[in-house]
Image (cartoon, rainbow, N blue to C red):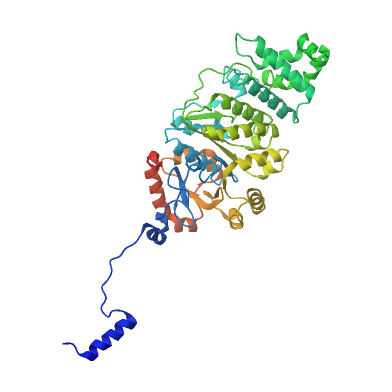
Amino acid sequence: MRDPLTALTDAFTSFLFGKVETTRLPVRTSTGQAQAVYLPTAAPGLGDSGVIIGREVYSGKGYIYDPFQLYGQQLPAPHWLVLGESGNGKSALEKTYVLRQLRFRDRQVVVLDAQGEDGVGEWNLIAEELGITPIRLDPTAALNHGIRLNPLDPAITTTGQLALLRTIIEVAMGHGLDERSGFALKVAHAYVNETIVERQPVLSDIVEQLRHPEPESAEAMNVAIDDVRAWGLDVALVLDRLVDGDLRGMFDGPTTVGIDLDAPLIVFDLSHIDRNSIAMPILMAIVGVWLEHTWIRPDRKKRIFLVEEAWHIINSPFVAQLFQRLLKFGRRLGLSFVAVVHHLSDVVDGAAAKEAAAILKMASTRTVYAQKADEARATGRVLGLPRWAVEIIPTLTPGIAVWDVNGNVQVVKHLVTETERPLVFTDRAMTESSADFAADDALRAAELEAEERAAAFVEQHVGDSESTVA
């Protein structure tokens, strides 16, 4: 029998401090608790369906992004703007993103490749690896039976043809068409479409009709035939550049037969065109409208339209208007537009500020690589980035960017697998930055272990992306 005093003491102690002899409870935890202890295992902030980009710098979590998976839930529009100075990783991001998207069977990508060296575009290596021949638009090659795209292709509606013709002329002239010139163009276009039925109408037919309008056209407006001819003279001179001038051979004949619009990747190589000439926005307008009417279809495919040097589109009010329509209607047809621009100031301070703002507003995803402090502040104001993100942009090392996905802002390090590396790092990338994703030695040493884990994760999942689709 226990001593009563001992029993009383034990009872009092137990009341104050709990049982003297305790039994160890079994350890129980939840997934959320485990993720809090080891953040790199936490679920990605944008979900786990889509393509792997890399990892969040601060938490170490994997970063997965896909506009088609997020559209309608976290994204009001599937379009994407990529900003940053050369040598910081934009090119590598674009290429790995496309390669990873193409592992989904229902994805198709068109790239307007405006950069390159050694006579080929920057996407040539990837095209070769996939067994695809780029559509090379080159005035010199076109004269020797090269690729042609016809702005008057019957696949384009008559309304689309006329809008495209107006855009070509307005871009070249640097101002809008007046009523008289617009009337002369409209009459010439209508006559050509009505009378030429045995073949595809071409630009030279429009030029000829502008120079020699039909008397009926003048009579219909109760004006002299010489007046109609005078109204269309400037228009004819502009279009003549595409027929007999420096841009001849690319758009002055029927569309080349055999262009495969069902290929998973379609590359338009524009690298032979001077990027700073008026020819580039004209080319982009023609290619964009031609694709709108021939490539985008109401089927189940998800399409990505990636444009390098996209300031040629955003900075021209006439070209921007065409692409605004493409972006607006593209959402219901499963189109994601990706615009790659070096500096936002290239577009927001130009003549097309209103049109640029409209296109930027449609881009619900914005990725910003390193910029100088002044440029970063200007970018932050336009895009509405939080202050901490603006302050960190000038300090970013190559391969790291600020991602803003409809207000969800993260700092993300893009990861490239060994399989992708030979296709991603072109000669251009190597000259701009000896290792596009190498940070300074101290940072690299600190991150090496985490990077190896994340890269192994990417290698495993990129090889079987379809398994990540919800």
**Residue 120: where, in percent of width, then height?**
54, 30
Quarter occupied by the C terminus = top left
**Residue 158: where, in percent of width, then height?**
64, 20
**Residue 324: where, in percent of width, then height?**
63, 34
- The residue located at (57%, 26%) in the rendering is 291
Q: Nearer the viewer, residue 189 or 212?
A: 189
Whether residue 137 is visible here, answered yes or no, is no
Q: Is residue 466 left or right of residue 402?
A: left
Q: How many marks?
A: 0
Residue 266, compared with residue 364, is above or below; it is above
Q: Nearer the viewer, residue 232 or 70?
A: 70
**Residue 329: where, in percent of width, then height?**
58, 32
Q: Quadrant of residue 11?
A: bottom left
Q: Nearer the viewer, residue 343 or 155?
A: 155
Residue 119, compared with residue 235, is above or below; it is below
Quarter occupied by the N terminus = bottom left
Residue 75, compared with residue 140, is above or below; it is below
Q: Is residue 189 left or right of residue 399?
A: right
Q: Quadrant of residue 315?
A: top right
Whether residue 461 is visible here, answered yes or no, is yes
Residue 72, compared with residue 134, is above or below; it is below
Q: Quadrant of residue 316?
A: top right
- The residue located at (81%, 12%) in the rendering is 225
- The residue located at (71%, 25%) in the rendering is 169
